[in-house]
Amino acid sequence: MTGNIGSSSSPSESPYRSPFGSTITGTGSAFPKNSVSNEALCERLGKLGLEELPGFGPQWIEERTGIRSRGLSTPGDEADFNSSLGWQASLRALEMAGKTALDIDAIFYATCTPDTIIPSTACWLQKKLGAKNAFAFDLNAACSGFVFALSTADQFIKSGQVKTALVVGADVLSAFTNWEDRKSCIVFADGAGAAIVERTPANARNRILASHLKSDGEAWDLFQIRAGGSNQEVTEEMHSARLDKMQMKGTEIFKAAVKTMATFAAQTLESHGLAESDIDWIVPHQANLRLMEAVARRLGASSEKFLVNIDRVGNTSAATVPTVLDEAVRSGKIKPGQLLLMDVFGAGLTYGTLLLRWGPATTELTGESRT
């Protein structure tokens, strides 16, 4: 490796040197039972009587997004509720980590599509798990949510307040999708991913090494749901105009995401004395396969380093990073000791990166931590 992460500062670090670090010891994921192919989606949209879009069809969707199928929740089916998907993913993560719900000290739940406004989806999950020893709250950073929540868990663990945390990224985007907008509805999907994060010695080799988080509220209007908040109730007029559904400026979002994800990833590597070649796997937000390919080109990285599952499950917002991570861990693609870079972008705008060396904290270093 070319760098020394332990000697670098990052926005997530303070002058206080904690004796603790944190590492991911278990992952899990869950998707709705209903997997919808491009063919089935086109058939469904064809029944809406929408104005013809030249060339629109299964191949058109795949060429523009890389998606062939996606999981869509069944409205009213409790098994497909946000918290239910989060519960399933959490059970799998707990099993991998060899933990029970009673071991959890904190639940950090990243979502922008909660079961209810009050109480939080984190509290619904706490009830379903029986995690009575944990405090729990939601965090909304849209598609960047899981990395924001994982960084939050890392900081709580370093503070000494938490020993074992459950971090969940879950969204049911289909509930807020405008199905009359064929250029956006073809992308969105539902799912949940979870990770168990445990305390390690600060000098453990395998651990979360650094996180960098940023927001840009000036670009709030690139992706929004205008109605449904406290400043704009959902009236019949608002519903008819689909203002209670997701509205996305697709071209602007695509350009902003490519530029931001590539630039911020490069800055993160540079700030820690690392080169792209030092990274074993890039774990990106699964917004659009074409977008990820553009980020890879701009970053000068091989697309083979990018973990991908959007082709089979669609864009699941806060669930994209933990689900593709879980898939790669369970398949054996990710191996202990490998260096991972999470790279995310979401509405807000929000974006961030997180560096971690994968695996249990079995190897400790003396003196300064390093890669």
Image (cartoon, rainbow, N blue to C red):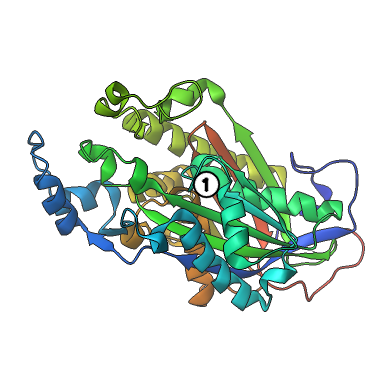
Image quarter for residue 16?
Answer: top right
Q: Amino acid at mark 1?
A: Thr
Q: Is residue 340 visible?
A: no
- In this view, the residue in front, 148 or 228, is 228
Residue 261, horizontal then vertical, whole percent: 51, 41
Query: Can you say which quadrant of the picture contains the N terminus?
Result: bottom right
Q: Is residue 29 visible?
A: yes
Residue 45's place in the image compared with 23, above or below, is above
The residue carrying pointer 1 sits among few (fewer than 14), some (14 to 19) or many (20 or more) residues within 10 Å by Cα, namely many
Residue 289, horizontal then vertical, whole percent: 35, 51
Q: Is residue 80 left or right of residue 359?
A: left
Query: Can you say which quadrant of the picture contains the C terminus?
Result: bottom right
Q: Is residue 271 left or right of residue 67?
A: right
Rendered residue at 23%/41% (across/down): 179
Question: Which element is circle 1 on?
Answer: loop
Rendered residue at 60%/66% (across/down): 129
The number of numbered discs placed on residues in the rendered structure image is 1
Residue 285, horizontal then vertical, whole percent: 47, 49
- In this view, the residue in front, 202 or 165, is 165
To which residue does mark 1 refer?
111
Residue 88's place in the image compared with 273, above or below, is below
- In this view, the residue in front, 212 or 109, is 109
Image quarter for residue 176?
Answer: top left
Residue 187, horizontal then vertical, whole percent: 31, 47
Rendered residue at 78%/76% (across/down): 362
Residue 76's place in the image compared with 361, above or below, is above
- In this view, the residue in front, 12 or 295, is 12
